[in-house]
Image (cartoon, rainbow, N blue to C red):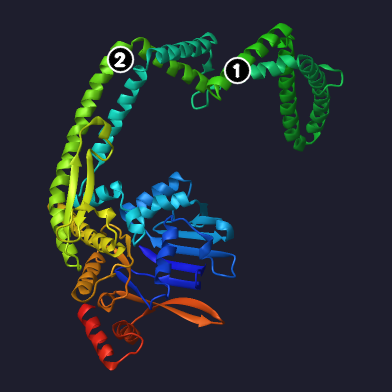
Amino acid sequence: MLGELRLENYAVIDNVAIEFAAGLNLLTGETGAGKSILIDALGLLLGDKASSDVIRTGTERAVVAAVFETKGTEARAVEAILEANGLDADNDSLILRREIAAGGKGRVFINNQPATVAVLKQIAPHLAVIHAQNESIANFDAAARRELLDAYAGVELDGVSGAFARWKQIRERIAELEQDEQDRMRLLDLWKFQWREIEEAHLRVSDSAKGSPQEQEDEQLEAEKRVLANAEKIYGAAMNAFDLLYEGNASTSSSLRAAQKHIEELARYDAKFQEALTALESARISVEDVGTTLRDYVGGIQASPERLAEIEERLALLDRLKRKYGPTLEQTIAFGEEVQRKLSEMENKDQTLVELRAKLALTGDEYRKAARSVSRKRMDAARRLEKLVESEINDLAMRASFRVAVEEDEAEAKWSSSGINEVSFLIATNAGETMRPLEQIASGGELARVMLALKASVEAGANSATANAMANSGAKRKNAAAQRTLVFDEIDTGIGGRAAEAVGKKLKALAKGNQVLCVTHLPQIATFADHHYVIEKREAGGRAKTSVRQITGEERTEEVARMLSGAKLTETSRKHAEQMIRANG
């Protein structure tokens, strides 16, 4: 749900912030005041293309920001998208900001973190849908039509998508085995070479102590190489340390023994030196232990140019294999094991293909079963939905015929994770006309009204299905699914009177389960508002300036009266406005 929309230096708006609420939010104002500017700005936050033309004259950049409240499944979906793009979610709120700079450059921020327009487009369907003369058709593709029908029918696609993924994976393995003979032989030669090269190297990853990481052969060899390459320096350092600590005439061990005798003499006369004597004895033993270790170490040092050359040659081989097959020795070994598996499959191609084809047939049957079940639900729901939508449409000043066409194609080339159906919405807006796809309707106003009827029908069906499911399970309907924001612009084009009132009622009904924003020119629709906002354009300092404010009470009555009678208000229009607001409020 949209909580706040803020615009800065956008078109004729210098700075405005609007707080929206649940229910039906209606925007009114005189023609040219800038009502559609707000819708366009919201579209930018949903990923629409930006243009520097929207920057207010005399400023360097325009800023559009919004705060959305997300809950339930929509919140989880948004959180997953943000996480996949390396962005942090912020509990139940989402802060979007987009900056448009001169030259078309701009920046995007989500929860105050740098993001991209692509991420905005990913999360947009979970936040808001704009139905206007230009946005409706763009948002009404094949996937959107199918999703609308599925929402009405309460279709779950987990079974179909899972079966499709399993079938597709097996099919791809079969295709790999069934490549042209020339390609197969080329692959076999390559895999054999790779496997032989790794196998003949006899790579090793030794197991170390439990709980500690494995020690790889190249790491062991590097340590040994350092010792061999510096054997003379190591020998000299170890011998010098041994002499100083243990062997020499003035060694540390000899000095400590001499000091120890003098301390023993002191301790015979003064007991306080007994503790110092013990510490000195411990130090001497530690020094002699280090000396013994050095002596043993020196005895094991052997300068071997032959062994050093052997290690360097081995390390060069390991380095070459790691560059070709994996950044680490462990990954190189894993690559060799994978190649060996492929070789085994390829060399036992016929048997493997028999097994895979049997699995493919089983997964194909699973997919068909799941897809047919979904298809039946869609077809049953389509008959109900088309009757409901046609009735809704004809309440909105349209004499139209409406049909939901669900085509079923079980050809494997048509299989997808969403099933075997193509959904089309067909309409004839006048008697005697041929039914055409809904998205081909020329009038944006007509399309917006049809979308209103569709949304109202789908919402009613989805709410009914949810209520029935909860009733059957004995669950209480508490904290229902989160509201999305539905935006309707120019929905009242070409209508008036009874039809306008019907549109208002439909919007009001739709707003019970969703947050609805609607730009309207008609007082009949405006009187149904839960929250009424007026957009005004004034001239200040020689420049046009648009402002937006929420109105209630007498101000709202005045605005509805203005919409009824025009610029000149009359007492009659005021009374009429009061009556309409009371009747529809």
Name which residue lies at 22% across and 41% down: 421
Residue 451 in sight here: yes
* Quarter location, residue 314: top right
Marks 1,2: beta carbons within 8 A: no
Point out which mark residue 320 bears: 1
Q: Is residue 396 above or below residue 129?
A: below
Q: Earlier in the sequence, mark 1 or mark 2?
A: 1
> Disc 1 on helix, strand or loop?
helix
Mark 1 or 2, which is nearer the eye? 2
Local SS, label 2: helix
Residue 191 vs residue 473, the one in the foreground: 191
Residue 468 x %, y %: 14, 54
Residue 415 versus residue 256 in the image, above or below = below
Question: Which residue lies most toward the right here?
Answer: 249
529 left or right of 204 in image: left
Image quarter where the N terminus lies is: bottom left
| Most foreground residue, 9 or 498 | 498
| Image spot of residue 48 (x, y percent) | 43, 56
**Label 1 amino acid?**
Arg
* Residue 160 vertical position relative to residue 298 in the rendered view, above or below: below
- Residue reaching furthest to the top: 306
Q: Quadrant of the C terminus?
A: bottom left
Of all residues, the one furthest to the front in this rendering is 432
- Of 535 and 398, which appears nearest the observer? 398
Q: Could you tell me the amino acid type at mark 2?
A: Thr
Drawn side of residue 493 relative to residue 232, left or right: left
Is 291 situated left or right of 262 in this image?
left
Disc 2 packing (10 Å; few <14; some 14–19; many ≥20): some
Q: Which residue is mark 2?
A: 352
Residue 147 location in percent, x, y?
A: 26, 49
Residue at horizontal 78 percent and vertical 15 percent from the top: 235
Question: Which labelled disc corresponds to residue 268?
Answer: none
